Image (cartoon, rainbow, N blue to C red):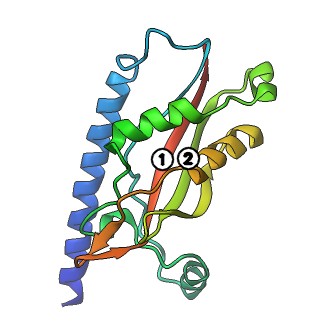
Amino acid sequence: MKRFGSEKLLSIKLISLLAMMFLVAFFTSCSNNGQSKESKEDSVNLAEIKTIEQEERNNSSSDKASTESKSQAYESFAVDEKPIFPGGDEGLTDYVAKHVVYPKESKEKGIQGTIYVRFVVTKTGTIGETDIMRTVDPLLEMEALRIVKSLPKWTPGKKNGNPVDVWFIIPIKFKLK
């Protein structure tokens, strides 16, 4: 019985990984096609707007304790319906591009890179707990967190027909032109 659950989870992870690889390839090949003719000298680009599937957590008691101290949110692959930003992925891309301000000091130093922000979309659709998964510069990190915390209300994710808190990850790409 326990083996069946593990095989099912492994299948879900494999399918999610293949879907994520397809999406990364798709967004990478399309990254320059969606740029505006009126683009500024400096741009902030949200390259991939999809959740990034997380590795299965270790079953150690210390890991369980650290997970329990955090939000009791589900990983995106564990829900029936994922959270949806108003306007979908394109709406999220537009929102980030419109509201991000490239930090002056980072711009002067020529600092570029992608910040991965992990956050909870609560069962009410608001943004809850936030974490930085990968960073390149503290100022870019602060700007990425500011933007994520300012996101408007989402349609919450659902599990078994009920709204639930769901972890979501977005990469925010800071690029100087």
Using a 10 Å C-alpha cutoff, classify the residue at mark 2 as few (fewer than 14 neighbours), some (14 to 19) or many (20 or more). many
Mark 2 and mark 1 lie on one chain; the one further toward the N terminus is: 2
- Residue position marked by numbered label 2 in the rendering: 116
Q: Residue at x 37, y 20 (%)?
A: 34
Compare residues 100 and 110 and report the one nearer the observer: 100
Mark 2 and mark 1 residues within 8 Å of each other at the beta carbon: yes
Which label sits on residue 65?
Answer: none
Residue 4, image quadrant: bottom left
Per the model, the C-alpha gap separating discs 2 and 1 is: 6 Å
Which percent across, then down, holds residue 29? 33, 23
Which percent across, then down, holds residue 72? 49, 79
**Residue 31 visible, this orientation:** yes
Q: Quadrant of the C terminus?
A: top right
Which percent across, then down, holds residue 52? 41, 52
In the image, is residue 21 above or below residue 155? above
- Residue lying furthest bottom in this view? 1
User: What's under tag 2, amino acid-wise?
Assistant: Tyr
In the image, is residue 43 above or below residue 76? above
User: What's under tag 1, amino acid-wise?
Assistant: Ile
Q: Residue at x 78, y 26 (%)?
A: 104
- Residue position marked by numbered label 1 in the rendering: 170
Which percent across, then down, holds residue 20? 31, 46
Compare residues 51 and 102 and report the one nearer the observer: 102
Q: Quadrant of the N terminus?
A: bottom left
Q: Residue at x 74, y 20 (%)?
A: 110
SS label for mark 2:
strand
Is residue 65 shown left or right of residue 108?
A: left
**Residue 47 visible, this orientation:** no
In the image, is residue 173 above or below residue 74? above
